[in-house]
Image (cartoon, rainbow, N blue to C red):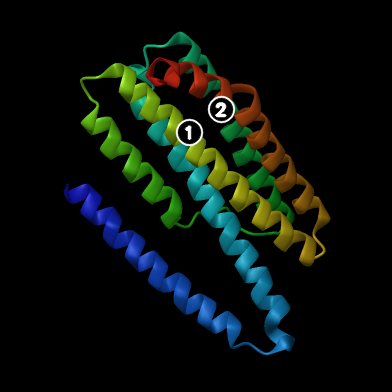
Amino acid sequence: MAALRFYSDKILESWKIHIKTTAIILNRSPLNSRKTLRRFFSESLKELYFSENIIFTEFGKISHKIKSEKLKFILKNHLIIHLKHKERLEKIFQMQNESLKSKECAAIIALLNEANKHFTIFSDDIVNCEIALILTSRKLAHYKIAAYGSAAHLAINLNDHAAATLLAIDVQEEEEFIERYLNEITYEFLKPYRP
C-alpha cells in the first residue's frame, strides 16, 4: 500500500507540473511557441522512453506467473515490439542531439498501479490474473498508440519528418499487435464467460 500511495503522490505531483507547464505554454507569445513546442516534444519523448522501460521491467516481474503458453508467446512478442520502440526513441534522441533521459509518465504509472491491484486480487486465480494481464496489455497498447501518435504530430509540426516517421511506425506496430494478437486472445479468454 505504501508503494501505491507513493505512486499516487507522484502522479498528483506530475499532473501539477503538467498543468503548470500547460499554463506557461498557453501564455507564451507566438515568437516563443516553436521553442515551447520543441520542448513539449522533447518532454513527450522522455515520457515515452520512461514508459517503454517501466513496461519492460514490470513484465519481467510477472512473466513467470503466466501459465498459458499462447499468452506467454503473445506477450513476449509484445516485449520485442517494446524493445524496437525503445531503440527508435534512442535514435530520435540521437537525431535531436539530446541526451537520453526519461521522465515519469503519470498515465503509465496509473495503468500499472491498476494492473498491480488486479494481480493482487487474483493472485490465487490464474485464469482471472491472465485475463487482467490481457486487458492491461490492451490498455497499455492503446495508450501507446495515442502517445506515439501525438508525438508524431508534434514532430510533423516541427518539420522533423524523420522522427515523425519513426513514431508513426511505433503506432502502426501497436495497432497491428492489437489486431493480430490481442483481439483474438481477449476473445478466447473471455469466451467462457459469455451468456
Instruction: Please indicate whether residue 3 sits to the left or right of residue 91 in the image.
Output: left
Q: Is residue 62 above or below residue 127?
A: below
Q: Amino acid at mark 2?
A: His
Q: Residue furthest front?
A: 195
Q: Which mark is residue 6?
A: none
Residue for point 53% across, 28% down: 79
Residue for point 58% across, 33% down: 83
Residue 119 in percent (x, y) is at 28, 31
Instruction: Please indicate whether residue 157 sits to the left or right of residue 122 in the image.
Output: right
Q: Is residue 1 above or below residue 8?
A: above
Residue 145 in percent (x, y) is at 62, 45
Q: Disc 2 marks which residue?
A: 78
| Mark 1, secondary structure of its residue | helix
> Is residue 92 something that shows in the picture?
yes
Label 2 crowd (10 A; few <14 / some 14-19 / many >=20): many
Q: Amino acid at mark 1?
A: Ser
Q: Nearer the viewer, residue 75 or 48?
A: 75
Mark 1 touches mark 2? (CB < 8 Å): yes
Q: Disc 1 marks which residue?
A: 137
